[in-house]
Image: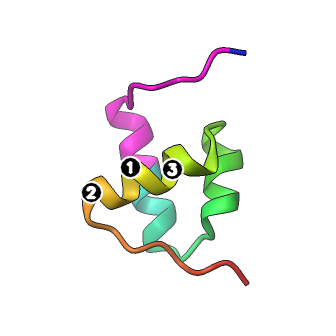
Amino acid sequence: MSVETSWSLDAVQSLRSMAREGMPVSVISLRLKRPVDAVCAKLAELGITAKAEV
């Protein structure tokens, strides 16, 4: 299975938008078809705090 490592501008914009809406990382991960770790790492790189899992 190939893991996408580069983030397109559209993917980053979607990530920012979903995080701003308060979407949990697990849901963002599924929507962007990326591992939870990759989503968390990108959020950290962007300085965005993700909503805690409930």
Residue contact between numbered discs 1 and 3, judged by CB atoms under 8 Å: yes
Q: Which residue is identified by label 3?
A: 39
* Residue 54, above or below 43: below
Left or right: residue 8 compared with residue 3? left
Helix, strand or loop for disc 1: helix
Indicate the amino acid at tag 2: Leu
Q: Which residue is identified by label 1?
A: 42
Helix, strand or loop for disc 2: helix
* Residue 29, above or below 52: above
Indicate the amino acid at tag 3: Val
Please provide percent x and percent y for residue 11: 44, 38
Q: Which mark is residue 46?
A: 2
Residue sitting at the far top: 2
Please provide percent x and percent y for residue 48: 33, 68
Which residue sits at x=28%, y=53%? 45
Which residue sits at x=51%, y=44%? 38
Indicate the amino acid at tag 1: Lys
Q: Nearer the viewer, residue 1 or 30?
A: 1
Q: CA distance from mark 1 to mark 3?
A: 5 Å
- The 10 Å Cα crowd at callout 2, few under 14, some 14 to 19, many 20 or more, is few
Please provide percent x and percent y for residue 16: 39, 58
Please provide percent x and percent y for residue 36: 62, 51
Q: Which mark is residue 16?
A: none
- The 10 Å Cα crowd at callout 3, few under 14, some 14 to 19, many 20 or more, is many
